[in-house]
Amino acid sequence: MARTSKAASVEKQPPKLKTPRILRFNIWLVGDTPLITHAWSEKARRDMLSKQTREIKAEGQEPRDPQEDFLNSLYDMGDGLYGFPVTAIKKAMNSVAHVERGIAKVDVFPGIWLDHDIVRVRPALAGAICDMPLVRIVAGPPEMREDMVRIGSGLKKTANLAYRAQFFPWAIQITGRVNADRISEEALLNLMHWSGMEVGIGEWRTEKSGVMGAFHPADETEVRAWERFRSGNSAIPTPSNLREAA
């Protein structure tokens, strides 16, 4: 009779998975320069759908309505509140991550979860749904901004006026979870600092050869000031870079 070794008779046990060390975080991002929003309007969505489905478009161009362009550039969350896509903040953090900085890009998207609200916007196609993951912009009423822009591609670019919403001063409270086994709390804060200075969010940001949408993580004094403003107990805080300049 063949002899069976003790090792062969023992059933192999599945490897035990290590539970990740998940930590909650709460960081206020305070704007250093104005934030310009540019949401896709329902009309722009319909025009895009018409081109893709080759629908016959009525001749003549509709009259321009700058006020409508301004309102359509906002991410409306209802009840007089406005938001911004949380994915933009995640992408900004990913843009500055680098292994030489101690934070690999491959760790940012799976290692950080940002809380957000799901807001449903009107789609181009009736019956479809379009949900946007937004975080609230804490600010005063938006202002209409006029900019000279060039639209089109290549040599066919033409000058045009763009009317979009601008917020300043502004802040965004970011909460979420981080896998501390992949990204430390210090590294997370560094990502916020670097992304605010080197990338920014919104239109004409640093990453796109602009100066807008820059931000920094708030210190304790700034956090208290913005929380008081959000609760309606104080005036809107003056950004620290403006206080220093004065």
Image (tube, rainbow, N blue to C red):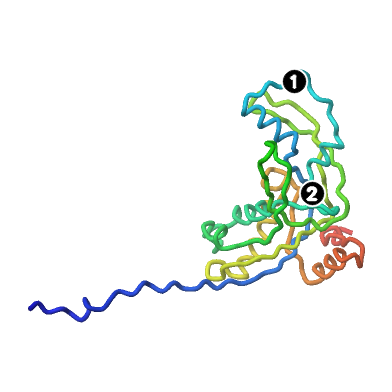
Nearest the camera: 83 or 26?
83
Label 2 CA crowd tier, 10 Å (few <14, some 14–19, many 20+): some
Nearest the camera: 211 or 185?
185
Q: Nearer the viewer, mark 1 or mark 2?
A: 1
- Position of 192 compared to 9: left or right? right
> Residue type at mark 1?
Ala
Q: Position of residue 177 (x, y in %)?
A: 62, 67
Q: Position of residue 116 (x, y in %)?
A: 69, 59
Question: Helix or strand or loop: what does disc 2 sit on?
Answer: strand
Q: Position of residue 99 (x, y in %)?
A: 52, 59
Label 1 CA crowd tier, 10 Å (few <14, some 14–19, many 20+): few
The residue positioned farthest toward the front in the image shown = 127
Asked if the residue at tag 2 contacts the one at tag 1, i.e. Cβ–Cβ closer than 8 Å, the answer is no
Quadrant of the rendered structure where residue 147 is?
Answer: top right
Tell me which numbered mark, 1 or 2, is placed earlier along the sequence. Answer: 1
**Relative vertical location of residue 60 with respect to residue 173 in this rendering, above or below:** above
Question: Helix or strand or loop: what does disc 1 sit on?
Answer: loop
C-alpha separation, residue under disc 1 versus residue under disc 2? 29 Å
Q: Name the quarter where the C terminus is drawn.
A: bottom right
The residue positioned farthest toward the bottom in the image shown = 6
Identify the residue at horizontal 50%, vertical 73% (top origin): 19
- Position of 72 compared to 22: left or right? right
> Residue type at mark 2?
Asp
Q: Position of residue 50 (x, y in %)?
A: 67, 28
Quadrant of the rendered structure where residue 149 is?
Answer: top right
Q: Which mark is residue 76?
A: 2
Identify the residue at horizontal 79%, vertical 49% (top origin): 76
Quadrant of the rendered structure where residue 110 is?
Answer: bottom right
Identify the residue at horizontal 60%, vertical 62% (top origin): 112
**Relative vertical location of residue 179 with respect to residue 120 in this rendering, above or below:** below
Q: Name the quarter where the N terminus is drawn.
A: bottom left
Q: Which residue is mark 1?
A: 58
